[in-house]
Image: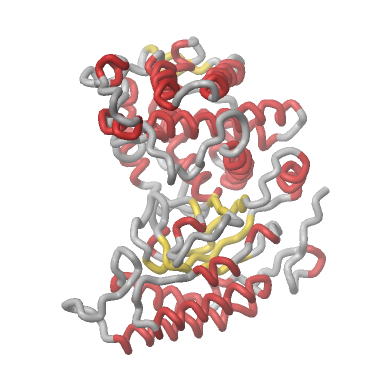
Amino acid sequence: MTEILSPVGAPGGTMSPDSVVTHPAWAALKDAVETIRPWQAKDGSIDLTAEGAPGAEAVRRQVDRAITAIGDLAPLLPHNADYHRALAADLRRWADEGFGVPDFLDSLLAFQPARRRADGLQHLVVFPMYTQNGNPDRNFEAVVLRMVWPDWLAELERTRYDNPLFCGITFEDFTAGYDTNSAVLFPETIAVRQAPERFSWGGIFCDREAARFRRVSSAAVEILGLEVPADIHAMLGDQERCQQAFVLWDMIHDRTHSHGDLPFDPFMIKQRQPFWMYGLEELRCDLTAFKEAVKLEAEGYPQARDMQFAVIFDRMFRFPVTGERVRNYDGLGGQLLFAYLHQHDVVRWTDNTLHIDWERAPKVTNQLCGEIEKLYRDGIDRPKLVHWFAAYDLVSAYLAPHPGSVWAKGPDALDLDQPPRKLVDDVLPDEFPLSMFYEALAKKLRRVIASTKGITAHSDTPAAA
């Protein structure tokens, strides 16, 4: 088994019961950060000359409060000593230089949570950053988290699913940027003078994912009259079980972006493509994780069976009806999975009741994964535009395009003298609209999905529709 390091001051490998969030300095730090945040512009700077702006001394007082609080909390987190020293220095420099665009590269480089993935280990994180699916501005955020790294997961990562940068994490407490739909902590979102040559960690909050899944899936099961196996009913009532399923899903999904045929930029920063390409990539990673879960279940991993239900339910019930319909690539992937299972008679919607053939579901889900993998493999030998059309053909075989779509009319309808990136402008914001099934489901789940904003393991879940 992989050795799990014990944190300082935790005898016998047991995590210290001392929690950062119960220390008075945490409340002081949160208050200082929340005071600074409204003063910041989109890029994280503070314009001291703007109407209603605070004075420089007022801002500096809050920065000093934050630095003092971090110093008071640091002894609880000796494994973060280098980071906290660099953090204090970055905060002082930001103040000394007049509160311009923040540069926290030094503290980012000093924060290395993936080097010591001990189950239950706490971290105190403060950065100027945007929160994906949360706050788009680079405001300061403070978050206390715990690592999720049980022995069985560490062994799988070491022996089969190498992902040395992945951190499964849970919330202890957070500032306003995380009282949102954000479930990730990524270094790419942090304000720095230049991006590091490579990033060395990435965190996903499996507790928020699990709590959100439980609430939405429980409501969907009730609304749709779906009969589910007894052990899955029990799973939906068990936050810890769901967290274990999600941390396994996340670890395999995350590594899949850089594995297999036709590697893809997982953060989609440098590639301008039609949004169905992003949808297929995210679905490929989820279905690859599903395929591995089928194997792991056969080997006796109970988390793997739970993970299969998590993938199917989250993809079919939550993803298609969450968020705006503008280039909603995750929603598209969920629509495609449902349509594929429906058209292969695994899913039936009759008499206002959803039926799922649980015995055939794994085989047919893996079959869709195989079709996407073949698309990628064949894409190696295709020009980019030809590959995009092949992907469109795969999606449109199961989902009806918008009647006004130019892309649906085929290559002859497009100006192929333009470079491929310009043809992306001809993609409709909602190229594949919701089916009548999902239009009805969206109305019934809307309030439930809205209620998951800021949800954590400590929220009251599940909730009825």
Which residue is found at the position 37% from the left and 53% from the top? 134
Q: Quadrant of residue 193?
A: bottom left
Which of 180/445 is in front? Answer: 180
x, y percent for residue 258 = 59, 39
Left or right, 134 with respect to 460, comes to left
Left or right, 464 with respect to 425, comes to right
Say if 432 sits above or below 198 in the image: above
Q: Is residue 165 visible?
A: yes
Which residue is found at the position 56% from the left and 30% from the top? 262
Q: How many numbered circles are shown?
A: 0
Q: Residue furthest front?
A: 417
Which of 224/179 is in front? Answer: 179
x, y percent for residue 334 = 43, 28
Q: Quadrant of the C terminus?
A: top left
Left or right, 345 with respect to 223, comes to right
Which residue is found at the position 61% from the left and 16% from the top? 363
x, y percent for residue 423 = 30, 29
Say if 418 sits above or below 375 in the image: below
Give the colour scheme shown. Answer: secondary structure
Q: Quadrant of residue 201?
A: bottom right
x, y percent for residue 185 = 50, 56
Left or right, 399 with respect to 346, comes to left
Which residue is found at the position 55% from the left and 73% from the top? 22
Q: Is residue 241 visible?
A: no
